[in-house]
Amino acid sequence: MTPIEAGTAMEFVILSDADFETFAKGHPQGSFIQSMDLTRFQRARGQEVELFGIRQSGSLIAAGKLVYSSNRLGYKIADCAKGPLMDYSDPTVVRFVVEQLKKHAASKKAAELRISPNIRYIARDEEGAEHPEVEDNRPLLKEFEGLGFKHQGFDMNFANINWMFIKQLDGIADSEELIMGMNYRTRKAIRKAEKNGVYLEQATLETLDEFYNALSTAGDEKGFTYREREYYEQLLRNTSDEFTKLMMAKINIPEYRASITERLDAESKTLADLKREVEETGSKKKANRVKVVQDLVDSYERSLKDIERFPDSVGVATVAAIHFACSGDELVCVIGGTVQDYIYFNGATSLYWGMMLHALNNGYSRYNFYGTFGIQGQDETGHGGYEFKKGFGGEVVQLVGDFVAPVNPLIFHGYRAVRKLAGAAQTVLGRLPLEKLPVVGKFRRNR
């Protein structure tokens, strides 16, 4: 370990896997992005990954993972997503860390450095209302600007998620207290799914096709971007069973139909007996009971009608699939959804509930619903998903966002000038055939 600057107690070092893992696991800003499991996975995929730290008087006070990527022109980016992990309330530490990162990235021939601290911009409640009295990191934007970074804005970032919905689990004693913290509609959906026999299963290499078929179907139907099958196969091969949880909600159609039919027969018999007693005795109490049982009979009949399109030959159906990641103190719902044909069975609700129980029973203090959009109003894209998550209880979390700094200014500004020129050419040239476009136009179109 060689100090970067003389006369300071802080030094920039490249960390061993063990030192990084120990620091990241116990850090309050830790996430699955800044984890050793994901690092091993990225290395297995051939990505260039580097673990760094800052030591002060021998103690590790900051750390992070840098991932390097290059486009086909050789333009190289050093990205510390959801990091660095450090004390952002100490300007001296912040200044030292980012300046050393800029120098190190330049030494690796990168043109730009990206960071995106895993801290809140400003505290918000479940409705998205701001609460600066709880936490307010808005001054960081000006601080980073003074260090040569440009903030990338507050728009929803679908690649490096910056708006989330998180439920804190600390202080919740058991499953009953957990479910009672949810709204009535969510509780009802959970209990209905359980009663109907929806069950959860973790995908393995042998059952990955089941998971991926459901995930890709849901993605195509709802328009969210999912990874290729190979990505999930490599996750299973290179990360632990606890870190990567590819979860499926399933239902056995023949068993479900048989169960509903059995319940319908039983309640129909009860209804007939009650009606006969009312006719014979005129009992008002029995008459009120008739209404309750009639509602049950009607409900079971509707359920059988709803699944007429699913013959018993379907067997076991995978109704929803979600990729979860468990790391440090947090369980994260990375991506997934319900197959539209099976939405009746509340598969996503079952997965959220089941994994929330897993988090509660295994010492995770946060359940992170992750990317959350449409917070500002019902006309916004994603508002339905936001309302669905609110039913489980929690709060909106807005991170400070992404910051970009040039570490090789000549290449950095030159590349942006080319991109700007290419964009202008695309606007002017419009729909000209590709073969008639100049070089800049071709570059933009191909990208």
Image (tube, rainbow, N blue to C red):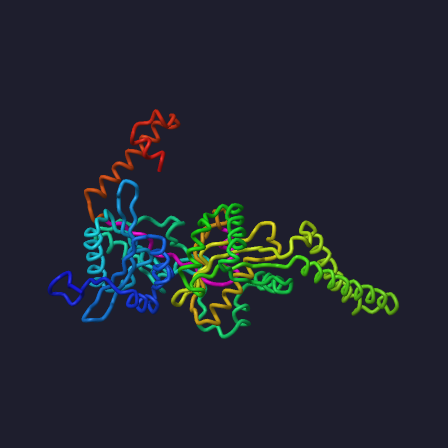
Q: Which residue lies furthest to the front in this view?
A: 206
Image label count: 0
Drawn side of residue 323 relative to residue 92, left or right: right
Residue pushed farthest bottom? 173
Indicate whether residue 392 is drawn in magenta: yes
Identify the residue shown where x is 35% and y is 67%: 25
Q: In which quarter of the image is residue 197?
A: bottom right
For the point 33% across and 61% down, the residue is 136
Above or below for 421 versus 16: above
Q: Note whether 17 is above or below 67 in the view shown.
A: below
Q: What stretch is highlighted in magenta?
A: 383-405
Q: In which quarter of the image is the N terminus?
A: bottom left
Residue situated in front as seen by the camera: 124 or 81 = 81
Q: Is residue 126 visible?
A: no
Residue 2 position by quadrant: bottom left
273 vs 424, left or right, is right
| x and y, in percent, of residue 417 in the image | 25, 37
Residue 327: image location, x then y, percent: 40, 65
Answer left or right for 247 relative to 444: right
Q: Which of 27 and 379 is in front in this view?
A: 27
Q: Which of 239 and 282 is in front in this view?
A: 239
Report the residue that reaches farthest toward the right.
280
State the residue at coordinates (46%, 60%). Answer: 324
> Is residue 24 visible to the viewer in this orientation of the structure?
yes
The residue closer to the viewer here, 402 or 322, is 322
Viewport quadrant of the C terminus: top left
